[in-house]
Image: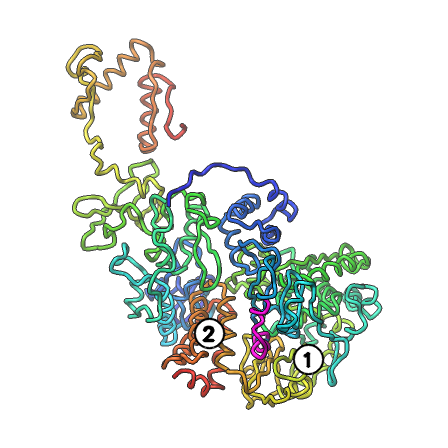
Amino acid sequence: MTNKKITYKPIDPEIKELVRHHGQTGEAALEVLKDLDAENRLTPATITDTARALRLPAHRVYGMATFYSMLSFEERKNILRVCDGPVCWLKRASEQSLVSSVLSAVGDNWTVERSSCLGLCDRAPAVLVNDEQAGPVTGEDAPKICEGWRGVPTDYSQPRPGEVRVMMANADKIAPDSIESAVEYGAYSGLKSALQKKQEEVLDIVEASGLQGRGGAGFPVGRKWKFVAGAKGSPKYMVCNADESEPLIFKDRVLIDTNPHQLLEGIAIGGYACGATEAWIYIRGEYEYQARLLERAILQAEAMGFLGANILGTGFSFKIHVHRGAGAYICGEETALIESLEGKRGEPRLRPPYPPSYGFRGKPTAVNNVESFAAAPHILKNGADWWKSLSNYTTPGTKMYMVLGHVKNPGLFEAPFGLTLRQIIEDFGGGMQEGSTFQFALCGGAAGTIVNGSLLDVPIDYASSQKGISLGAGAFLVCDQTVSPVAFLRELLHFFAVESCGKCTPCRVGTWRSAEILTRMAIGMGQPGDMAELQALSDNMLLASFCGLGQSVPIPMNSAMKNFAAAFEKAES
Amino acid sequence: MPINITLNGKKIEAQPGQTILEVARGHDVRIPTLCYHKDLSPTGNCRMCVVDVKGSRFLQAACVTQVSDGMEIETDSPKAVASRKLTLGLMLANHSPSCVTCDISGECELQDLAYEYQVDAPVWGMKGTRYPVDSDPNPFVRVDFNKCILCRRCVAACAEIQARDVWGVAKRGFEEIIVAGAGATMLEARCESCGQCVAYCPTGALSNKLSYGQGIARARQVTRVATTCAYCGVGCQFDLLVKHGKVISVASNPDAPVNGMALCVKGRYGYDYIHHPDRLKKPRVRRYLLEYKEKRLKGNAWDWIETDWDTALDLTAKKLREARDNFGPDSVGVLTSAKCLNEENYLMNKLARQVIGTNNIDHCARL
């Protein structure tokens, strides 16, 4: 290898134009990369030119291009992303291998890629055909994908028996693309009510309602907004976390699908309360359909005067932007999300400082989940006491639940807190499937607890993880006697290993090594000492990882090894 | 307002805003570090400096965690030590195992810590090579990512010390790797070969190509001689590494008052003139100046003859005076060198303007 002679070349004018189109700041880097990728023009040379046009070091743009999984240096005409999530894995186990049937069905114009969970768990086994979500795909349907077949979206217009619908209340009435139908059913009346109050009053109402963040951690929304409102620094920003890349979770997608204006209204209420004038919805790149839906909804709302300058003549101006990710679970971590929004690799930041004091562009920023924002309009409309009255249990309000796996009616429903796993399976999931008996459930999300039958009757909320069963983002994947807990944990660790950002050692190598051990164990090649090593890796990830991703990988690991010790011991020898 | 904390059972005072590591070092309590370096922004990547803070579910990275009032810190709790050992094992699992043939064996921070904690590379660790050895054609920097532990000091050194932003991080998770530019060679990525990344690399992932294989880190064979760089007037200091009476390499000296660890490509890598056979060690003059009355070009009159300083300087002074007296002061021009000190340049200025009487003076740095 010798050094090439380095000669000066002007920046490709097309890239210059592209960069100008996206705003000529470092924050535009991901958008430019996505456009280049769509034209199959992602190469080290175009990346270097992009970096020069953006006045960034080349490594920074290259680091991004290789970080996000949806971007590729390979030439792709049509892309079929096959979901590799645990729900799709469960479905595939009983049917023919989806990938092989898809591979044999598609022609030369198609590139088939694996993808971490696509957020289409209610349509499992799912695929993403270019930008279009498709599923459920069986082996027979695979050939039809190339001809435009996309399967059937799950219908959530009618509530299940026992549901208490607030955020989903008008799912059957509102046409998602029509602001008129949304307004007819009360959209933006919560914002109107907020704008008639003082900022502090809105903050007090949200705090009094006891609304807890729905991303999984359950941090009180009112308190977070008060931090932002009281933080020094201006301007202030709202960020809506719609990255939803955790396997099992698809509630945010359904909330956007059924009622995008509810989300926009919630963000605007938050913006008014916090004293922010601009907001970004960071939506995962796989949700292109939902991103476009939101963009259209924003335009409609601006035309009606619910967003934009001088909203409803009150003098309050608020702009919402949609920002697409490009495939990275870690960007659901709020500081990694902010980094990504700033046009960097989605790696978590040091905390403290926390986003309410030092967030997007270094300014006070409120980062909340889609579901948290979606709840806000209803609280403003009906009051904090009403919100509290919805749930008899410790946590106020309603929650979106997802029940998946070997139940008769998998899908999504809205209900108060404090449900038990038995209620979720029997009352809402329609009971176990014919011939299935309950073996275990993954509760919360991929980073949730794996529980056995002994915890079926524990009421679940944000605090119940102390008892060994977590609520997380509200997903429950129920598995019957046919599923090996070892193989199941392997699927989860495989996901974490693929999605670890690589910043810190315990998670970067720990997830990879754990997945390696579990892969071996699951196919009967375990060795004595494997469990002890898994436990040590897990303990170290919990204690020493840099961010929440590494710290939560041990939750499913520890609970699976504790609750299914016999299965792991058997796999070890 | 100082705050009170407890460090390893001892009550001490600390300043708000200080990190645990700073406080500990101020009280001679050692916390092991790898990705941390006092000259660079701390990142908290490697997780070697984790310590036990009472009341916290997780261990805290001492390099980035600020102390708070009433904090109770234990630096070597069994939990923290166990975590360090495991993390070290994970690093060693992805580190070329052949210390015996490594150029920096003996100065390797990873090796030091592995020895201190008695951690071996796990049996499942890397046996062969994941990446090509000596993968970059840079003439001075030798790159071997099989030894890289992804601490990212090189990235920070390049960005913060040299402000060239050559090194960056690509890919993610287990596949993560350090890259130059857009996956290019170092020189293509605007590298000016200053070697700062080599100086800050805690392992042998980045080493010096010119001295590779000469055992620069083997303390029993190598003498370190602190010296000042001869190249320019900045006066950077560094250590010459001398083996068998020969200079084999230059190493940054962290205590250097002017430059710290930083050096430029000339200071760090331009030392081959020291033992070069063509190097002039005494002044030389043309033969005719010593043996004839006037300028001659025929025969051997134009040869260089080695002489002593007094003779050479007398001749120079005489010729300069003659030129000034016969042709006027402006017939003389003075060109000074960046290798001279500021004081020497000042004196040349005086010589030109006041002794010779000309304003014809310039400096090579303007060329």
Q: Nearer the viewer, residue B58 or A510?
A: A510
Q: CA distance from mark 1 to mark 2?
A: 30 Å
Kindly identify which residue carries mark 2: A542
- Quadrant (top left, top right, bottom left, bottom right) of the C terminus of chain A: bottom left
**What secondary structure is found at the residue carrying circle 1?**
loop
Q: Judge from the rendering whether residue A550 lies leftward or rightward of residue B146; answer left or right.
A: right
Viewer-side residue, B195 vs A490: A490
Q: Chain of mark 1?
A: A
Q: In terms of sequence position, does the residue under pointer 1 or pointer 2 come before the other?
A: 1
Label 1 vs label 2, nearer the camera: 2
Residue shown at the point (19%, 19%) measured from the top left: B303
Density class for disc 2 (Cα within 10 Å; few <14, some 14-19, many ≥20) is many
Q: Is residue B53 something one can see in this rendering?
A: yes
Q: Which mark is on residue A396?
A: 1
Relative height, residue A246 to residue B354 (above, below): below
Residue A225 lies, in percent from the top left, at: 65, 67
Judged from this view, the residue extending furthest toward the left is B291
Was residue A89 drawn as part of the magenta stretch in this picture?
A: yes
